[in-house]
Image (cartoon, grey):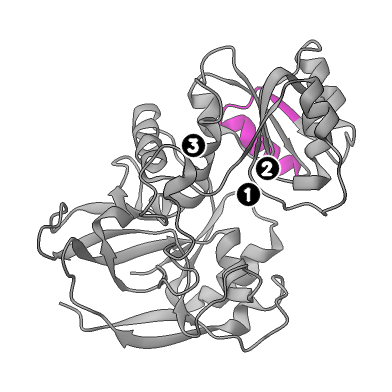
């Protein structure tokens, strides 16, 4: 069993908190000890690690939780169990993906713990060769995916499944507006309207099942186009990632009694008074914070059932992690950026 591991650690060499420039100088490759798995723990050999926006926030220093110096970054990944501790539910040879929030098993968000999320605060992350993890930090890897594909899933895919849980059932006839690809909603039978500023990303959404595509740069009043496409009814569910910069338009194209899932706040933030419209249309607003273990389990089942494959934008070698982050923050790729560990 390995006694040491090479890991990418975070040190605030650049204190600007600028997510576009601070990531590469804040990443340092070191060799650190590997502990022995304890009760209900396993040792995993990591094969690949995906990068998410949250990881870039942590590395740059922009994340709301203070980052302990020397934190191993990243929360996604796929690997193989190579050793198990007492009473573990896993076996040597099991192929797994990671669950960043092991305290939240399912249901509403009460089980979430800010002080126990992988790759943030004081909890060591996944960008390392070997990693000891609790049983609840693992979910079975989809059998139809490669290591690289599987490593890209848990954070974005689990969040998507949590978002789709915002309404009672996604089925044929359900309409979903997404500021992303919408692949899972389409696989469940929904009619997906995808919005993006990138025609390339919209074409990827089409490959993944989106029925309608809207470039919001060429259609700045995109909410009127959504209402036209739904014959004035509006959509059942909006997955809003822009926050205050997009929520008014999102509400304008939700049907009476529909739902807005607030997934992020990537756009420019501004004052927004939406209370009247929310009440007038009896809209449900739901904040989306990460994902539960059950969301990831459901995601794996859907991926296997429909033989879904996540788009991969670029793959980097382990030694090139700073370059991978530099590429990620440009946000000019279609598909996920993944780092091969082995």
Q: Quadrant of residue 237?
A: top right
Give the secondary structure at mark 2. helix
Residue pictured at 87% horizontal, 24% vertical? 224
Side (left or right) of 241 relative to 290: right
Find out whether the residues at labels 2 and 1 contact each other: C-beta distance under 8 Å.
yes
104, 154: nearer the viewer:
104
The circle drawn on residue 334 is 1
> Which of the two marks, 3 or 1, is nearer to us in this view?
3
Q: Residue 20, image x and y in percent?
A: 72, 71
From which residue to which does the magenta span run?
Answer: 198-213
Mark 3 vs mark 2, CA separation in Å: 20 Å
| Residue carrying label 2 | 201
Q: Residue 140, image x and y in percent?
A: 27, 46
N-term mark: 3 or 2: 3
Categorize mark 1 by other alpha carbons within 10 Å: few (<14), some (14-19), many (20+).
some
Side (left or right) of 342 relative to 227: left
| Residue carrying label 3 | 161
Q: Residue 76, image x and y in percent?
A: 44, 58
Mark 2 vs mark 1, CA separation in Å: 6 Å
Residue pictured at 26% horizontal, 67% vertical? 45
């Amino acid at each position: 069993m390995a006694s040491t591991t090479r890991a990418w650690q975070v040190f605030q060499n650049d204190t600007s908190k600028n997510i576009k420039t601070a990531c590469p100088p804040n990443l340092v490759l070191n060799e650190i000890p590997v502990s022995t798995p304890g009760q209900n723990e396993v040792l995993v050999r990591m094969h690949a690690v995906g990068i998410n926006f949250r990881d870039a926030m942590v590395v740059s220093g922009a994340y709301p939780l203070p980052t302990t110096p020397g934190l191993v970054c990243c929360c996604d990944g796929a690997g193989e169990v190579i050793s198990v501790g007492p009473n573990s539910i896993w076996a040597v040879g099991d192929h797994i993906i990671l669950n960043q929030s092991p305290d939240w098993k399912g249901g509403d968000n009460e089980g979430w713990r800010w002080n126990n999320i992988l790759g943030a605060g004081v909890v060591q992350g996944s960008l390392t060769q070997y990693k000891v993890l609790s049983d609840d930090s693992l979910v079975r890897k989809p059998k139809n995916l490669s290591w690289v594909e599987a490593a890209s899933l848990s954070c974005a895919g689990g969040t998507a499944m949590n978002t789709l849980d915002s309404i009672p059932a996604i089925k044929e006839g359900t309409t979903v507006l997404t500021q992303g690809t919408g692949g899972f909603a389409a696989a469940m039978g929904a009619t997906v309207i995808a919005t993006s500023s990138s025609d390339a990303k919209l074409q990827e959404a089409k490959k993944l099942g989106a029925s309608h595509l809207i470039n919001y740069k060429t259609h700045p009043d995109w909410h009127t186009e959504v209402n036209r496409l739904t014959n004035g009814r509006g959509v059942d569910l909006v997955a809003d990632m822009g926050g205050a910069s997009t929520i008014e338009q999102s509400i304008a194209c939700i049907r009476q009694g529909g739902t807005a899932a607030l997934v992020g706040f990537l756009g420019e933030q501004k004052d927004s008074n939406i209370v009247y419209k929310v009440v007038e249309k009896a809209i449900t607003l739901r904040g989306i914070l990460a994902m539960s273990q059950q969301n990831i389990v459901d995601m794996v089942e859907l991926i296997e059932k429909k033989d879904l494959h996540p788009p991969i934008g670029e793959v980097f070698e382990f030694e090139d992690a700073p370059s991978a982050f530099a590429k990620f923050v440009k946000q000019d790729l279609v598909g996920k950026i993944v780092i091969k560990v082995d």
